[in-house]
Structure formats: C-alpha cells, structure tokens
Amino acid sequence: MKLTGRFFLTHGALGVFTLAVSFVLMLGGSLVMLRREASRAQMQALETLGMSAREAALQREDVALLNFMRHSASEPGVLYAAYRNPRSGVVLTAPQSFEGEASATGAPVVPGPATRPRTLRNGTEAVEWIQPVQVEGLRNGWISLVYSKTALARGLRDQLARWTGLAVAAGAVALLLGWGAACAIARHLVTPLKLIRDGTHLVRSGRLGSLVAVDRDDEIGDLARDFNAMVLQLKELDEMKRDFVAGVTHDLGTPLHAIRSASNYLQAGDAGPLTDKQAEYLLMISNSTQHLISFINNLLTVSRIEAARLEPYFEPVDVMAHASELVALYQAQARERGVDLKLVRKVPYVSLVADVTMFRQISMNLVSNALKFTPSGSVEVVLGEEDGDFLLEVRDTGVGIPPEYQELVFDKFYRVKQGKEFPFQQGSGLGLSIVKGLVEAHGGRVTVESGAGKGSVFRVRLPKQPKPTQWYGGRKEGEA
Ligand code: ADP
C-alpha cells in the first residue's frame, strides 16, 4: 500500500479510536452531570414552593399558595404539588385530581428537604420531594412536589440525545480536519520521496546527471543530499570506466586487426602451402580473432552511445532489401536448428530514412538473439507501419523472458540466467543495450512483449523521417 493511503488509514483509525474513547467517557460524565443538574433543579423548585408556603401561612393566604402550586405543577415532569397541615387539617393539591394521593401519604419525619420513591394508586412510579414548612420556629405542615419517574427519564434521555448529536457533529468535524492534516503531512513527506524515487529511476536508466532538488533540513533532506552525492560519485566512476574501456578497446583493436590480417594472408597461402593441421589451427585463430573484434566493436559502440557521441547519418533505407538479405544470411543457421525463419511484410512498401549501418545492426542483433533463444518453432521478421512510424518486429516462439527481467535485458552486460534445460551459448549481454542506444539515437523506441516459455516479440518503432532533434543516444544535448 502507498504511504499516503497508509497515512489516511492509520490516521483515520487513530482518530476514530480516540473519538470513540472520548465519546464514551464524555457520555458517562454528562449522564452524571445531567442527573445532578436535574436533582438540583427539583430541589430548587421545592425550596421556592416552601418559601411561598411559609409566606402564605404567615399571611393566611391559601389562595396565593394554591396559585403558586399550580404554577409548580405545570413544570415539566411534575405530576402534582401538595400542601398538607395535619394540625389545621388543610390539604391543598394542584391539580386537584391528585387530592386523594396527597391525603393518602403520611407526614414526613425529615428535618429538611428529602426524596422518597412513590407508587401512585394508578400504578405510576414517582419520586416525591418533601419539605416541612417552618413558621416562627414551629412546624406548620409540609409541602411536596411529585415527579413522574418516566417523565424524568424521558427528559434526561432527550437532553442526552441533544448532547450526543452535538458530540457526533463535533467528532465528524474533528475527523475531517484530522484527515485534512494527515493529507497535508503525507504530501509534505511523500512529495520529496517521489522526487528521490524519480531520480532513482533516471539514474537506473543511465542518466547520471539527474540530481534531486530537495531542500529540507530533516532526515528526508539528508537522504536527498546523500542520494545526490552518490549520483555524482557514480557519474565520476562511470566517466572513469568509460575512458578506461575506450582506451583498452582501442589498444586491443589494433593488434587484433593485425592478427586477423596476418591469418588471412596465411590462409590465402601467401606464405606458402599449409598442411591440414595448420589450416585447422589457423581457422581457429581466425574465428576467435573475429569473435574478439566483434566484442570490441560492441564495446566501442556502447562507449559511443554512453558518451552521446553517436550521430546517425540519415539516408533513405531500402528496408525490404535489407530485411530479405538478413533473412537469407541467417537462413542456413535457422535450418540447421530446425527453426522456420521468414520475412513478413504487412504493407507492400515501407519507407524509412535512417542510418543504414545502425539499422542493419539493430535488425541483426534482434534476429540473432531470436535464433539463439529459439530451440524450435519459428522466427518472423515483420515489417510494417504504426501510427505513421516505421515498425520492425522480430517474433519468436522461443524460451521467452519472464516479466521481471524484461526491462533489465536492455541494460549492458545483463543476461537472463537460463535453466539447465536450455544450454544456449550466452553472449556478452551487450546486444540489446546497443539496439536500445541505436534506436533512441534515431528518436525511436524499442519494447519487448514476452513471458517465460511464451516466445518474445521485440518491437522497434522509428520515425520515418528524422526530426530536427537535439536528442542523441536518448540524452539531451549537454546532459551527461
Ligand atoms: P546476449 O549477448 O547475451 O544475447 P543481449 O543484450 O542481446 O545479450 O540480450 C540480453 C539477454 O536478454 C540475453 O542474455 C537473453 O537472456 C535475453 N534475450 C534477448 N533476446 C531474447 C529472446 N529473443 N528470447 C529470449 N531471451 C532473450
């Protein structure tokens, strides 16, 4: 999973977990708080009613008390309010329908406000708040406020639901803000990492001038600086190696050409007749020399490609003639191995302006590889066009290349390790890197489609006409 995705998930999970824990804790806390608040309000209402009862007793104004009781009874959750004075026999109840209930209860023995559970005669569960009424130091009856338990619970539930709604909305906003912050942090971390990754890809494809521009003081900045230092070191090593290879190949080439010329003269009988054994040994010397010269030429081509010193000489190419010649050249080798080698033309005529020598080398490298890695079956050289470009395809039914190696085979010296069941003669691993370099020097592209045991299709696409371009060997001018 990508880093950004992970950030979102972990941050989201952490946020949800924190919110859930805080929600449970706050829910428990607010339940206690709401209950305490309700209880305080009920006691306050009782105290106010008690004060009114004392005033009424002092001024002998039962009507005023009754009005106040009616007012108290209209408060939410209150079933009825009552005043009872056993000494004077006065019983006031609001609403009056509860008079029976008020008369039925005994006098409280409490000195101050108290609660007691009650079950009314109609079965209603209630809570009764009671308080004696003291007038001039004497007890003058008692007042009570009776609340319905169900109504009290409903009130509590409603308040809790309102609070929960608010908490959920606040939680959702917090979660969204958290996700926004996670997104910003992820971007802050991932953007420079992506730059470093892209730089790695460029270096991997041989562009050793690719430094990453990450200017930070943290560990990612350190990584970028180390990466750049490593790239510069690689570039320096690469230049040293390139100079070394160019020097060595040049030094080796001269004596090898001399050996080949000398063995050619000997084979031609310039130094007198040869015995059969001498001729046999000379052939071995000549073949090995030729092999070494081809290898050195390949090395030189690779050095030129890498130094971007390869400039195609563009001229019209008789593609059909070259392809037919190539197929004819490899026909004997194909027949010997029991492979059907043929040329397929998808269009009657294909035009191409390219470097003839380079074009020949591209097609030869691909066809010789196809024959080398096809123990039986067929090899097709297909000429055609695609979206206005010239297209050369070399298709084989050979061992194929597993997907994980398909990009690597274009690297120089890279060879796919073959199983023991395929005793192919391995080459130097330069052929495809040369193909890629030459194709890119033309502003084209080479790709492979393959799979283990499924054969391979190498596809070369070249512009039919050279473009006025500053690209050589796949590099921009001035780029190392
Ligand atoms: P080599 O000189 O070893 O052929 P190349 O650069 O031409 O070097 O090829 C690199 C590797 O790619 C080869 O060693 C081989 O493993 C693989 N390869 C190239 N062409 C084919 C093909 N047509 N079928 C299967 N494998 C191939």
Image: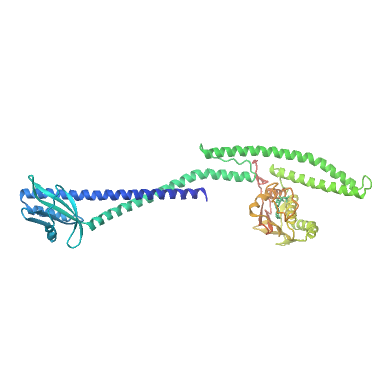
> Is residue 173 at least partly visible in the picture?
no
Pick out the residue farthest to the right.
272
Measuring from the top left, give residue 133's x and y in whole percent.
11, 49
Q: In this rendered view, identify the residue nearer to me: 40 or 208.
A: 40
255 up-or-down from 339: above or below: above
Q: Quadrant of residue 196?
A: top right
Residue at (68, 47) in percent of width and height: 411
The type of colouring in the image is: rainbow
Q: Is residue 192 visible?
A: yes
Q: Position of residue 256 (x, y in %)?
A: 82, 42
Q: Residue at x 42, y 47 (%)?
A: 178
The C terminus lies in quadrant: top right
Residue 144, how many percent across, how many down? 14, 53
Query: Taking 159 as reference, is 390 left or right?
Result: right
Q: Position of residue 102 (x, y in %)?
A: 13, 57
Q: Looking at the rendering, which quadrant does residue 350 occupy?
A: bottom right
